[in-house]
Amino acid sequence: MPMPGTAAPGRLQAELIAHGVRMTRQRRIILEIIESATKHLDAGAILRKAQAADPGIDRVTVYRTLTLLKRHGLVDELDLLHLGGQSAHFYERRPSRDHIHMACLRCGKITEFESQLFERLKAQIQRDCQFHIAVTRVEMGGYCAECRRQPL
Amino acid sequence: MPMPGTAAPGRLQAELIAHGVRMTRQRRIILEIIESATKHLDAGAILRKAQAADPGIDRVTVYRTLTLLKRHGLVDELDLLHLGGQSAHFYERRPSRDHIHMACLRCGKITEFESQLFERLKAQIQRDCQFHIAVTRVEMGGYCAECRRQPL
DNA sequence: TTAAGTGCAAATATTTTGCTGTCAC
DNA sequence: GTGACAGCAAAATATTTGCACTTAA
């Protein structure tokens, strides 16, 4: 049984192929990196991991693959509130259920949280605003339980 | 009576002064632009408006003022899902009540929405996750009522 | 075979930093 | 008067584009 949030290996690859997209050695590597990531990666981190598997992979290929995945709605793009002054984007496989990202402004930890209330909020928006939601991005900055216990 | 979402003119300036921040001609211009904005502005748009009022104002001054405002929690930074391939950030005065940003992926219109359900969601997170929320950023991409009525 | 994809180089976009002179308080 | 601020130049970071070669289907 897959862990929550984890999908069968090769799933992204299968979905892209189902969308009629051509599969290449470079894409397989990049998809595998995104699928097996245990934390949020930015384009630079994906590039570094990809080059560890195949030194010839170019930065541009990473960006183009990310664009492709976004276009097919298979990954979500996050900013995670630009912790640490970063202005890069982070990527994650689109989850089956939307979740909220909590970024600790002190230790930088990112926590994810699913909530039935959030599902209700989306339903309310779709109904009251006649707005059809395709993608959501919820980021909250604050202070995590651990940091709140520590002295300043 | 002020319009919803609108504050007394000079309010940002007063708040910065109250925080012990030095007030300059350039800052006054930039603050006034942010306060009177009717839509979300990015740094470039703020710069252009500022230079219309005072051609000597430098881009760097705009960025430094935005950093200052963020540090004092007086503006929020948004990405608005990078509609149109932008990668710039947008800024808005921090509202008294958090709201959700809805970005139409077809016409680009940004709509804001306040919801008691969202307040409940935040309360749930603070309670269940022991996470103290300092700033929120909620962006939803989708299709607005008008665009849904139009033929493709 | 051939349309799509890759790598390389260069360009673009956005934001930040170092430094020197200026101004708010 | 002095420490914070502004402008200028340059750098750093992040991402995109043009083009010739390669490859998946």
Image: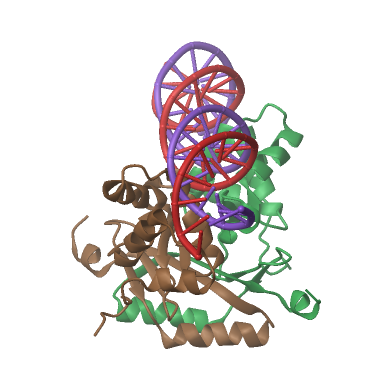
Chain colours: A green, B brown, C red, D purple
In the displayed structure, would residue A83 be above or below residue B133? above
Residue drawn 60% across and 38% down?
A27
**Quadrant holding the N terminus of chain A:** bottom right
Front-lying residue, A122 or C13 = C13
Give the image location of residue A107, x and y in percent. 74, 65
Residue drawn 47% across and 57% down?
B66
Give the image location of residue A130, x and y in percent. 29, 75
- Residue placed farthest to the right in the image? A150
In the displayed structure, would residue B56 be above or below residue A98? above
- The answer to whether any part of residue B150 appears in the image is yes
- The answer to whether any part of residue A77 appears in the image is no
Residue drawn 68% across and 46% down?
A32
- Residue placed farthest to the left in the image? B150
Give the image location of residue B118, x and y in percent. 47, 82
Give the image location of residue A140, x and y in percent. 57, 71
Left/right placement of residue B47 relative to residue D14 reads left
In the displayed structure, would residue B31 be above or below residue A145? above
Front-lying residue, B80 or B72 = B72
Q: Quadrant of residue A133?
A: bottom left
Residue drawn 67% across and 58% down?
A8
Q: Quadrant of residue A4?
A: bottom right
In the displayed structure, would residue A17 be above or below residue D17? below
**Quadrant holding the C terminus of chain A:** bottom right
Left/right placement of residue D21 relative to residue A134 reads right
* Tally of numbered tags: 0
Left/right placement of residue B8 relative to residue A29 reads left
